[in-house]
Image (tube, rainbow, N blue to C red):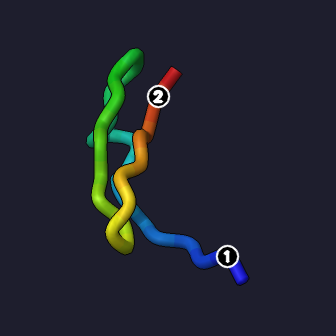
Amino acid sequence: MAEFHKLATVDEVGPGEIKQYLVEDRFVALCNV
């Protein structure tokens, strides 16, 4: 079953930015487009 992980707030990833996070041994990209 899928789990949700809070990575960042809207203020932490500005418009047009991409942030990389490590979640359970996997890198994920969080994009604010």
How many C-alpha atoms fall within 10 Å of the one at disc 1: few (<14), some, or many (≥20)?
Answer: few
Look at the picture and state if 25 lies above or below 32: below
| Numbered badge on residue 2 | 1
The residue lying at 60 percent from left, 78 percent from top is 3
Q: Amino acid at mark 1?
A: Ala
State the residue position of label 2: 32
Q: Quadrant of residue 23?
A: bottom left
Q: Is residue 4 left or right of residue 26?
A: right
Mark 2 neighbour class, 10 Å CA radius: few under 14, some 14 to 19, many 20 or more: few
Viewer-side label of 1, 2 = 1
Q: Is residue 29 left or right of residue 33?
A: left
The numbered mark, 1 or 2, whose residue comes first in the sequence reads 1
Question: Which quadrant, please, contains the N terminus?
Answer: bottom right
Nearer to me, 30 or 28: 28
- Hey, which residue is sitting farthest front in the picture? 25
Q: Residue at x 34, y 23 (%)?
A: 17
Q: Please, is residue 21 above or below residue 14 in the view?
A: below
Q: Amino acid at mark 2?
A: Asn
At numbered mark 1, what does the secondary structure look like: helix, strand or loop?
loop
Q: Which mark is residue 19?
A: none
Judge by depth and name the residue closer to the eye, 2 or 33: 2
The residues bearing labels 1 and 2 have C-alpha atoms spaced at a distance of: 22 Å
